[in-house]
Amino acid sequence: MITEVRRILMAEDDPNDAELTLTALADYHLANQVDVVRDGEQALAYLRRQGAWAGRPAGNPALTLLDLKMPKVDGLEVLRAIKSDPALRTMPVVVLTSSREERDLVRSYELGVNAYVVKPVDFTDLVEAVRQIGIFWAVINQPPPARRAAGGDDGGRS
Amino acid sequence: MEQTPPQPGRRLHQYWSDLPLRRKGLVVVVIPLLPLLVTAATLYHSDVQLARSQAAATRAIEVSDRLGALLTGLVEAEAGARGYLLTGREESLEQYRRAQSRLPGTLARLDDLIARNPGSPGVSPEQVAGLDGSVRAFVEALGALVPPARPGGPVDAARSVPRLDRSAAQLDGLRQAIARLSARSADVRRAREAQAAAALHRTFLLTAIGLAFGLCGGVVAMLLFMTGIANRLRRKARAAECLARGEPLPVLVPARDEIGQLGRRIREADALLQARDRSRQRALEDLQASESRLHAILDYSPTVIYLKDLDGRFVLVNRTFERLFGRTRDEIQGLTDADLHPPDAAARIRRDDLAVLEGHRAIVLEERGWIGGRERVYMSIKFPIDDHAGVARAVCGISIEITERKQAEESIQQLNAALRQRMAELTAVNQELEAFSYSVSHDLRAPLRHVAGFAALLERTSADRLDDQGRRYLKTIGHAAGRMGELIDDLLVFSRMGRVELRRTAVAVGELVEEVVTEVIGDGTGRAIDWVIKPLPVVQADRAMLRQALLNLVSNAVKYTGTRPRAVIELGACAEAPGMTAVYVRDNGVGFDMQYADKLFGVFQRLHAADQFEGTGIGLANVRRIVQRHGGRTWADGVVDGGATFWMTLPLAGEADA
């Protein structure tokens, strides 16, 4: 069984949350593959390889972890942009948020989110949740085939 | 017409009355004319007789004259002959010849007269013929005595005298015959003259009689005219006059002639007029009744009703109007709105009236005015009143005072506005609450998570460098953060229970209880619990919320029977108010002091120490909120250490929904 470990994009404005999540991922050696952006605007720039991210290697990340409440462009808008962009649409997106609000859940699933996870308050629970997400999406799940040549390269890289 | 037994006179009178006017006229003309005609005819006849008698008398005179002339001629001829014969004188001969030559002419004239009027003078032609013969014989005898032509010689007197005597005798005979004839003629003449005088006398008499009869006829005709035409016409004229004056008709005798027909027509006209009068009277009474009815309706109407003419002067107002303005209708009549209202209000009313008249249609409007010391509001309808030709002649208005209604409306509007304001405020509060719970859910949980997370990290990385007390502190920090997380979550659930929309359906409580019990048992610690589940109804409720309530109640029952060696939990239902059911959950747990029964359902209210029974104290608060939102109520019975029963009432599902 080939365990392909590919990059994960985490959009999270709160550095504490980012650190806790990274710490949880680090327990399973997934932390060094995570790129962190601080708001929705940067997340879209990353995905579209624009601005500061123009030089990153081509190809979509294996997973995008999306906080909902972010400055500038919030998570739901980023989600809408991803799901309406043919190049990004097939990429798995997991909302990782503090909100249990029903409307957030409904809106997210309407926009086509792949999973919705409420961050547990308890650190142990958080670690467990993040571990399962990371393992499932970054390791177990078979990503959609890359649509472009660059994507194909990305898929071949380990 | 009085009925009298028929009498001849009356019958005649009736016959006369029935006779058509044309015939009556004929009769009236003929009656005086007839005696006059008879008189005229008689007069004529009498006149003719008179003339005839006079003519006969005249002829008798002529005959006498001729007879006289004849006698004279004869006497002259004889005298001439005698003279000549006696004297021989030529003059006598000449006298003789002259007389002799005239005699045939005289005789012929006499003959002619008699022949033309035979018998009339009393002398017949035979008598004349006899006379003729005698005269000729005398003339011949004379001729024989006188020589035809022996002038100058004396005649033989001796021989001639005897002859002369004879001729004288002949002449005497002739003279006597002529005298007889003359006498007869004179007799005839006298008779005729007497006849003529008698005729004249008769004529006078007849004329007088004729005149008398004519006069009588005239009088009779006049009488007939009076009785048959004039009097009756006068009576008819009087009747017509009565008809014209509307007085009762005099008695009219019926007849079949034109005047009788006229009378009949007058009677018919009278009957017609009376019928018309009666129906007019009835119509008038009906009209008066209708009018008084209408007036009563107008007067007892609580609305203000008025009628104004084209110039805006009041023609009619009802009692409400009078009371409103404190004036009688007699005072109001003829006034205009300018007399009752301030100038601007009067002008506005007049404008509305003119709009009604010009537009020729009804308008409905709201009017305000300062009347009777306060401002009043009226709902009015104004409409034109037409004459028979459809031309507007007046404006009628009906106004109902809506001041109080208006005030009520205004206060309702104010209340509505206030309500809307409150609604807006509530909505704003709700939005704030939503924002607040969102914020709680997201923003408050984040630092909490950080506290717990970093405490855990600290413990993980530095636990060995801390002493026991420090490690206990770290643990406490972690627990406290976890507890706060639970509280926040519970609070959010509670808040959501109050906010989310109810989706009511028919829910079988029994099925729901089964689910909930299964869940609780699966969750449980394998404790021995006796479940007693009685028949449960079908209710009208939001399934998810009801499930939450049941879960809370059943969980509580399980929790608070934890100290019992054998827990008994009973679920059942009994009838409540109509359409409602009361569902209960009974346990034999630790129970509670009824003194605090009300506190049980409060948010985060607990009757037991946290270390005795875990929980935040939100469960019963949620149950109460859910049940309240379904229109039901909750309560609890309990005895300390003697178990508790929690009740909730719910609306039963209708049969259609079940």
Image (cartoon, grey):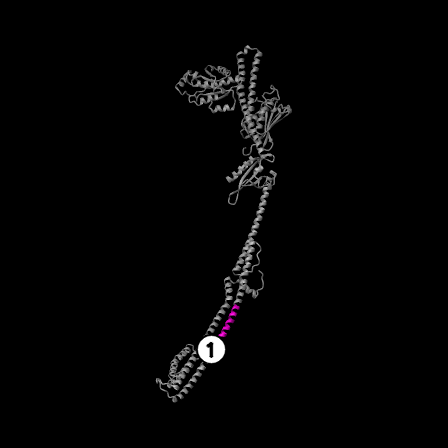
Q: Main secondary structure of the magenta part?
A: helix
Residue B191 in the magenta stretch? The answer is: yes
In which quadrant of the rendered image does the C terminus of chain B lie?
top right
Q: Position of residue A46 (x, y in %)?
A: 44, 18
Residue B554 visible in the shown view: no
Name which residue type carries label 1: Arg
Most extreme residue toward the top, as rendered?
B465
Per the image, the residue denoted by label 1 is: B189
- In the shown orientation, is residue B440 left or right of residue A91? right
Splitting the image into 4 quarters, where does residue B91 fall?
bottom left
Q: Could one spot residue B350 in this view of the protein?
A: yes
A152, B373: nearer the viewer: B373
- Horizontal side of B176 relative to B376 (left or right) equals left
Crowd class of label 1 (few under 14; some 14 to 19; many from 20; radius 10 Å):
many
* Quadrant where the N terminus of chain B is found in the figure: bottom right
Residue B152: quadrant of the picture: bottom left
- The image position of residue B307, as x and y in percent, is 56, 41
**Taking A32 as reference, is B220 above or below it?**
below
> Percent from the top left, x then y, of residue B232?
55, 60
Magenta region: B185-213
In the rendering, at what x and y percent does residue B219 appear?
54, 65
Q: Is residue A122 magenta?
A: no
> In the depicted view, which residue is nearer to us: B111 or B519?
B111
Question: How many numbered circles does the render carry?
Answer: 1
**At numbered mark 1, what does the secondary structure look like: helix, strand or loop?**
helix
